[in-house]
Amino acid sequence: MNRPMSTPETAAAAEAALPVLGVCLPNDDIEAQLDWIVQDQRDLEVQDFFSAEVLDGDWQAVAARTRKLLAAHTGRLGIHGPFWGFSLGTMDPLIRDVVRKRMDQGLDVCEAIGATQMVIHSPATTWDYNNRHHLPGAYRMFDNVHASLEAAVARAERLGVVLVLENIEDKDPAERVRLAESFGSDAVRVSVDTGHAHYAHRSTGAPPVDHYILAAGDMLNHVHIQDADGYADRHWAPGMGDILWGSVFKALEHCGAAPRLNLELRDKSGVQPAAEWFKARGLAR
């Protein structure tokens, strides 16, 4: 049987149908790669605003630079919210006050730059997974996270910002989804970090990366795309690790949502080659 011949027109149509990758960059790298970002109006996650030094310093000046840089950007805009030094699931009321302050500071930034998404970290740990049934009275993660986030969720609703819970040590791909659903709010959804999922798979016996995507389903609002070896949080370019990318993008076809697919690489100069790597394999561009 003869196969239909590919033409420049069909090839261009196939490329245009591929999902457009977004990127995670701080201001300095946004400026260096701005033309490429704006050319396809890629989704952008600004990564200047998760450190205490910035949030407790002159963050308004950093935000003003972001606004100026992105004057011609019309893609979806988000930030990585604060996460260093605390857990959303803390049991300590004093630490919870710090969490609430940091979440509020992150939302201040979102309001200032017009961001509609803030990435925050899941508090689930491997210890939690192994002890949640053994010590059921001690496992109060959902209650603790609600106590930490309820004010932030209410404010996010008013601002039109979605808080996305990113897997860190999560061994159960569905637990974080249930946590997000427990808020009953459009302002709380799920993020999947491919490298973190691969770590959990290889190092703790969790399911493979595509199962994290499938478990999220239509609650999936955001993906950090990075390659890894399953041992450490590498943030490598695709092809350097051994994530099965075909299965990841096949799972994305069934997630029932339109999540932001943001390249989060340690080597920021690698994001454009990474997009070309995915395009050459017919997965994304």
Image: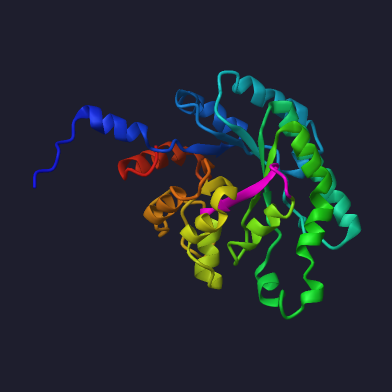
Answer with left or right where residue 51 lies relative to residue 92. left
The residue shown at (63%, 39%) is: 47
In this rendering, the answer to whether 175 lies above or below 48 is: below
Q: Residue furthest right?
A: 94
Q: How is the image coloured?
A: rainbow
The residue shown at (45%, 27%) is: 40
The residue shown at (39%, 41%) is: 284
Chain part drawn in magenta: 184-194
Q: Residue furthest left?
A: 1
Q: Is residue 185 magenta?
A: yes
Q: Nearer the viewer, residue 47 or 28?
A: 47
Q: Is residue 234 visible?
A: no
Q: Is residue 227 visible?
A: yes
Q: Residue furthest bottom?
A: 134
Answer with left or right where residue 243 lies relative to residue 93. left
Tell me residue 218's x, y (percent): 56, 48
Answer with left or right where residue 41 lies relative to residue 273. right
Tell me residue 203's x, y (percent): 53, 70
In this rendering, the answer to whether 16 lies above or below 143 is: above
Residue 52 figure quarter: top right
Tell me residue 157's x, y (percent): 75, 37
Tell me residue 2's x, y (percent): 9, 44
